[in-house]
Image: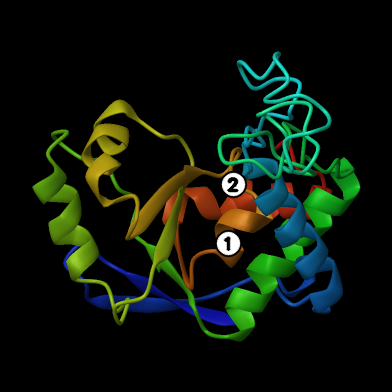
Amino acid sequence: MKVPLYTKEGKKKQEVVLNPEVFEVRINRRLLELVRNAYSANLRRGTANTKTRGEVRGGGKKPWKQKGTGNARHGSTRSPIWKGGGVVFGPRPRDYSVDLSKTIRGKALQIAVAMRGREKNIMLLESLKLATAKTKEWADIVKTLPLQGKKAVYLTKDLDVNLKRASRNLQKWVCVKSVSDVNAYDILQHVKVIIDESALEPLEKRLMAGVSKS
């Protein structure tokens, strides 16, 4: 598999051959779906909560006597059938998180990267070192790349302070991740994968190991 290497000015410098053992593995879409759903579930807060009739304030006094009024029988104004009453079978706080083994997370990351490579959505960028923490400097570099309006994830060997600060306002367009922190969900949520030239070797080592730290 060959991927283009671009300069900071957006010019195609050359094509780089990627390790087929890492970037040309068999695509297991069922595993990717499982992992994507698990990561999505882990992002859920699970704080939705409603009050039952026993938790709503008030309603301790019987609205009217049991017999003789002609009205239906009621014991509390906080019954679920009353306005302002409790909720039956409403949402309660719960934990939605799904545990995935390191092996599955690592394999999913390897497959996700390989899938983006097969789609020709991987590109390399010359080793980058921002002089300042200005968003404009980072944005000017990104704009030169052929992203075609697609969301991208940029993988770097080490996330230095300048790059971290400069990229904060563009995270919804180009998400910046270090090789040690990226996971399969990051790859699946972004169409384009930009790999810093210096991050290629560490990424290959991590994918070969098949073990995710995230």
Residue at image x 58%, y 61%? 187
The vertical placement of 84 against 143, above or below, is above
Question: Picture coordinates of residue 13 (x, y %)?
Answer: 30, 75
Helix, strand or loop at label 2? It is: loop
Q: Is residue 150 left or right of residue 24?
A: left
The vertical placement of 162 against 142, above or below, is above
Q: Residues within 10 Å of mark 2 (few under 14, many from 20)?
A: many
Front residue of 98 and 126: 98
Residue at image x 72%, y 31%? 93
Indicate the quadrant where residue 117 lies: bottom right
Q: Which residue type does callout 2 highlight?
A: Val
Identify the disc placed on residue 44.
Answer: none
Residue at image x 74%, y 59%? 37
Which part of the image, by quadrant, shows the C terminus?
top right
Residue 88 visible in this rendered orientation of the protein: yes
Q: Is residue 6 left or right of residue 213?
A: left
Q: Which residue type does callout 1 highlight?
A: Ile
Identify the disc placed on residue 182.
Answer: 2
Which part of the image, by quadrant, shows the N terminus?
bottom right
> Mark 2 touching mark 1, by CB under 8 A?
yes
Q: Which residue does the numbered mark 1 point to in the structure image?
A: 187
Q: Is residue 84 left or right of residue 73?
A: left
Residue at image x 35%, y 57%? 174
Question: Picture coordinates of residue 72 (x, y %)?
Answer: 77, 43
Question: Picture coordinates of residue 103 (x, y %)?
Answer: 89, 48
Residue 28 visible in this rendered orientation of the protein: no
Q: Residues within 10 Å of mark 1 (few under 14, many from 20)?
A: many
Looking at marks 2 and 1 on the same chain, the residue that comes earlier in the sequence is marked by 2
Question: Picture coordinates of residue 142 (x, y %)?
Answer: 24, 62
Helix, strand or loop at label 1? It is: helix
Disc 2/disc 1 C-alpha distance (Å): 8 Å
